[in-house]
Amino acid sequence: MSYIECLPDDPPFLVDELEQRIAQAIKAPVIKSIFIVRIADWFAPRWLGFSGKVSGASAAASQELTVPPFAPSRVVSESYFFKDKGAFVPGAAPLVLHAKQTPSASLKRQVAEMAPETALFWFSVPSRLDPRAAFMAHYPSPSGGLAGSYFGFRVSDTIKVVARLSWPKDEKPLPFVRRAPRKLIRS
């Protein structure tokens, strides 16, 4: 099953890598649905474990995980899949993750309340001007509660992982499948 539409300017080998990360993450039986959000341009790891702004410090982490407030104008696509007879199938989303709203309303959008038993994935691909790409996941943890992973990539004709973080810090990040470097085939 393909979860990400590979657009003409997307490096296919990066999309394949992201697909494999998603497939690995959704094996947990507790996950009943998934959101996959394509974000325009690279995004920083500060959104991993985001729970709002406290005293001017951005992206303070707590157990009250909040949907990262990406501006709706940066959301290229948002896909929803639900589990049906053991497989994830596309469906109509029960909510919009990145709605236009006030900053204070954004801080009330807690993942555990809005999307229980749901894995949330955000990704960006490199552009002609910026070789960076990002992948972030928030998902139900096997130990209970929510966990997350962030990967930052530098993409040329291969993929290089330049950042790998987990949230909470003692949680293991999603596995990174190490293979021989894949090269972009230019036609």
Image (tube, rainbow, N blue to C red):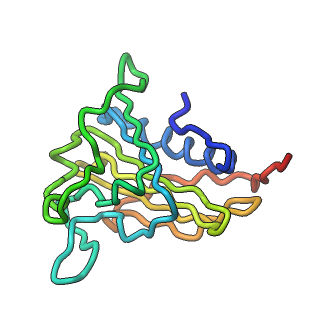
Residue farthest right in this picture: 187
Tell me where residue 167 sits by quadrant.
bottom left
Tell me where residue 66 sits by quadrant.
bottom left
* Residue 106: % across, % down: 19, 59
Which residue is nearer to you in this view: 75 or 31?
75
Residue at coordinates 29% horizontally, 35% vertically from top-left?
30
Where 156 falls versus 4 (above or below)?
below
Tell me where residue 86 sits by quadrant.
top left
Which residue is nearer to you in this view: 145 or 18?
18
Residue at coordinates 56% horizontally, 42% vertically from top-left?
20
Residue farthest bottom in this picture: 56
The quadrant the N terminus occupies is top right
Which residue is nearer to you in this view: 166 or 80?
80
Where 117 falls versus 177 (above or below)?
above
Q: Is residue 131 left or right of residue 89?
A: right
Which residue is nearer to you in this view: 111 or 130?
130
Residue at coordinates 46% horizontally, 65% vertically from top-left?
43
Q: Is residue 42 left or right of residue 85?
A: right
Total tally of numbered discs in the picture? 0
Q: Is residue 21 left or right of residue 71?
A: right
* Residue 160: % across, % down: 66, 65
Q: Is residue 37 left or right of residue 133?
A: left
Residue at coordinates 34% horizontally, 59% vertically from top-left?
71
* Residue 91: % across, % down: 36, 25
Where 54 falls versus 13 (above or below)?
below
